[in-house]
Image (cartoon, rainbow, N blue to C red):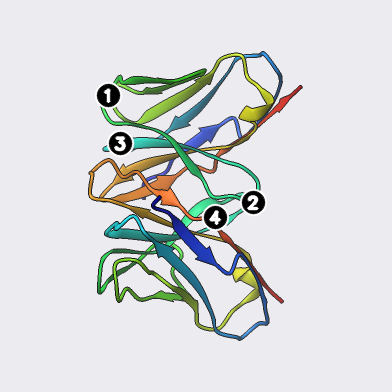
Amino acid sequence: TQLLEQSPQFLSIQEGENLTVYCNSSSVFSSLQWYRQEPGEGPVLLVTVVTGGEVKKLKRLTFQFGDARKDSSLHITAAQPGDTGLYLCGGGSNYKLTFGKGTLLTVNP
Amino acid sequence: DAEITQSPRHKITETGRQVTLACHQTWNHNNMFWYRQDLGHGLRLIHYSYGVQDTNKGEVSDGYSVSRSNTEDLPLTLESAASSQTSVYFCASSGASGTYEQYFGPGTRLTVT
């Protein structure tokens, strides 16, 4: 069974701070997705990383896929209250995704 | 615009009743998935389908069934609802791009009393 561990589980910061959340596994994945979920809604895809060592930027969000394709990180610069939500990583294999339990981020004004 | 919808959005039912949750997508995706989301467990895969007439069990399939008669729909049936099945259920779909990107519906909150 493939497992994805996300850390930290909870994170509460002030507006303007930087943060990094992690997604780690002992398994190799073909791709890794990051999603953000807001209360009462379904997860929304933020980014897909495929190549080991790949770095993608989405405005203030920077995503990195580990060289061995077993881990990933999400870095947010100058967090804003609108970044508040549950961040989920999902590792792809055999057309299925295995999800971590998520990092619940709260950005306080 | 293509979308994935779920109905109902909220459902309260009694223990022992059969319940069906609907999922409809207009992405024309071959792959469809059902998850449940519970505190402390994250998203867990219930059933999935890679195409019409194909269904497969996920990690928490006991007490649930699905059928795939067309590309657009994958209804999830709880044969005899139990209190342990109180949860939020999400349907998702993905294409054949090989990158495993999934698009989620808005969810159905099911309460079994």
Q: CA distance from mark 4 to mark 2?
A: 7 Å
Crowd rating for badge 2 (residues with CA inside 10 Å; few <14, some 14–19, many 20+): few
Task: Look at discs 4 and 3 and give the one toward the viewer.
Answer: 4
Separation of residues labelled 1 and 4 (CA atoms): 32 Å
What's the mark number on residue A31?
3
Residue at 29%, 67% in the rendered image = B71
Q: Tell me the chain of label 3.
A: A
- Dividing the picture into quarters, in which one does residue A57 lie? top left
Q: Chain of mark 4?
A: B
User: Quick one: quadrant of the C terminus of chain A?
Assistant: top right
For badge 4, the amino acid type reads Pro
Circle 2 chain: A
Q: Which numbered dot is residue A40?
A: 2
Give the left or right position of residue A91, taking residue B84 as reference: left
Q: Is residue B81 visible?
A: yes
Mark on residue A73?
none
The residue drawn where x is 28% and y is 51% is B95
Is the C-beta separation of discs 4 and 2 under 8 Å? Answer: yes
Residue depicted at x 50% and y 82%: B79
- The amino acid type found where label 1 is placed reads Gly
- Which of the two residues, B12 or B43, is positioned nearer the viewer here? B12
Q: Label 2 sits on what residue type?
A: Gly
Determine which quarter of the picture holds residue A103: top right
Badge 2 or badge 1: first in the primary sequence: 2
Provide the secondary structure element on which disc 1 rests: loop
The residue labelled by disc 1 is A52
**Disc 4 with disc 3 on a shared chain:** no
Q: Determine the CA span between mark 1 and mark 3.
A: 9 Å
Q: Chain of mark 1?
A: A
- In the picture of the structure, the residue carrying the numbered disc 4 is B106
